[in-house]
Image: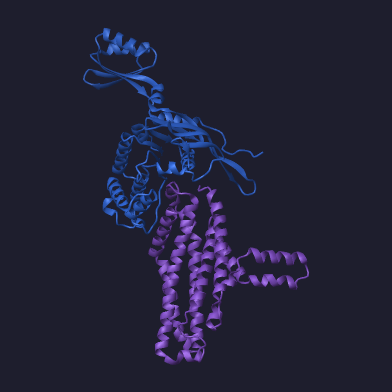
Chain colours: A purple, B blue
Amino acid sequence: MKVIGLVAVNVFKESVRDKVLYSIVAFAVMLMSTTYLIGQLTAGQDIKIIKDLGLASISIFGLLIAIFIGIGLVWKEVEKRSIYTLLPKPMRRQEFLLGKYFGLVLTLVINIAVMTAAFYLVLALMRLLEPGIDAVSAAPATDAAMLKAIALVVVELMLVTAIALFFSTFSSPFLSALLTAGLWVAGHFNSDLRNFGAVVASPTLAQLTRAMYYVLPNFSAFDVKSQVVHAQAVPASYVALTCAYGLTYIALVLVGAAAIFARRDFK
Amino acid sequence: MDAIRTEALTKHYTVGFWRPRPYVALDGLTLQVQTGEVFGFLGPNGAGKTTTLKLLMQLIFPTSGRADILGKPAGDIDVKRRIGYLPENPYFYDYLTAQELLEYFASLFGYSPAERRTRASRLLDEVGIGAERRLQLRKFSKGMLQRVGIAQALINEPEVVFLDEPMSGLDPIGRREIREMILRLRDRGCTVFFSSHVLADAETLCSRVAIMAKGRLVTAGALSDMLAFQVRGWELVVSGLTDAVLAAAKARGDVMRVTMVGPARHALDLPLDPPPEKTLAALIAQGACLVSLTPIRDTLEDFFVQQVSGAGGSRFRESA
């Protein structure tokens, strides 16, 4: 466990000093700030627009970090040969892999925390500038329920990171990015796969789509942004169950990644 | 107990997309390295040196055979605590400083923060980059990275240290410093296993060497045995000989070549047969004075070229 922590802290330290990451977060914060201006264009709906754009920004920029840093985690170490000095140190390959994963998750969580703080700051400023804004909306501007949506975004991105790491243990960064993004898109349409069986005549195809529904990660389950923006209740039990689903999936993906990584030759 | 022991260690890679064939990177290497010796692992490019080191570090896995370090299988966590490894052309994390990198590696061995700092600082001073300790590694030259690589290989005071081309990228002063460091390690009782192209380094440092070619072990043994076996004549330096005596000795075939090396002093190249004692006795009887008698040996380079040029055969195996 100690080794995993040491590797994770090192990944975090490297990420923090990488200017690319700063640019992504700075761009996200800037975008959230401009949502105020965009909101001004839509009379009566401005607070909803700002919330929608803000949550979408957190999700999309988090996704960019998860995929593009996730696919490079192992690949960069192998390509630059830094793994040659690290793996002969007293550690298991699985510890190295988990350390890399948790290091990126730590980076991701801190970046999302910065984006969330910026998001709430924009909303608080709006409340100050337009005191009656809460009265025209179903939920207050700085509604704490949005944190539930952000928590689920964090778990979703942890799963994306695990998938990116899984692919990066055996394929090139380009292919890893493609496969991870493909799974993310497919996962958001997962519920359609379940219903696909009802509209096709072939029982084989119906069974196949049903099997895919169970195997593919159900990313749409993590998306409650629309509900919180429209002040619809998101039960705590739903959040807990979805988190448990996400964490179980993450564990399975990491076990698979560790099994592949443990036998890989670093030529 | 041997520090390193390999038995029929073999590594095949599959090459070719349409007609995959096994390529033999290492073919049945059996080798023993004793505790406390400096062992040179020599061979031309593509001989299988780096493959062997990677197998010993478990960066790649053998197709067959086994490798033990300090009596335990290579890759064992306990073994990893007791060894150091410098890969060929090492590269590290761009955004860490040399001090941070060494402290990070020291932390993986479980040292306390204070111990990490002390070890990192001491080793960076030892390899001559103490002044650059706070510089990020992306700003380091190749030679400086090589020095960091050597420092990190020694962070745990290893019992066995594996160095893949340790002199690579170093200037003459750097090479001399590393040679001295290897000798200090030997004096401390550390086993040093290093691969190199630079035969002069092996000749200066090693007690035993192995020569590899095309993935196979060509020969292994004590350097003194290998080169003594290859004595191909004698150089006799004498004084007080007349030209007539020299001409007669040459005519008999006792002397192959005569070189004037000073006033009334000659260097004579003698063949292996007749024995030099006989020729020397005859020359002394004719008024010569002995200055020196030295065997003419093949250098390690001569021996190496001879051995490696004889290694033939394809490295592709036809699959069944």
Q: How many marks?
A: 0
B93, above or below B235, in the image: below
Quarter holding residue B35: top left
Quarter holding residue A246: bottom right
Image quadrant for the N terminus of chain B?
top left
Which residue is more in the foreground, B9 or B247? B9
Using residue B204 as the reference point, say whether residue B60 is left or right of it. right
B187, above or below B286, in the image: below
A78, above or below B279, in the image: below
Q: Is residue A24 visible?
A: no
- Residue B229, horizontal then vertical, whole percent: 41, 22
Residue at figure coordinates x 29%, y 54% from the top left:
B133
Q: What is the residue that sits farthest to the front in this orientation?
A: A237
Residue at figure coordinates x 27%, y 10% from the top left:
B284
Image quadrant for the C terminus of chain B?
top right
- Residue B116, horizontal then vertical, whole percent: 32, 51
Q: What is the residue that sits farthest to the top in this orientation?
A: B285
Q: Is residue B253 visible?
A: yes
Residue at figure coordinates x 49%, y 78% from the top left:
A146
- Residue A140, horizontal then vertical, whole percent: 47, 85
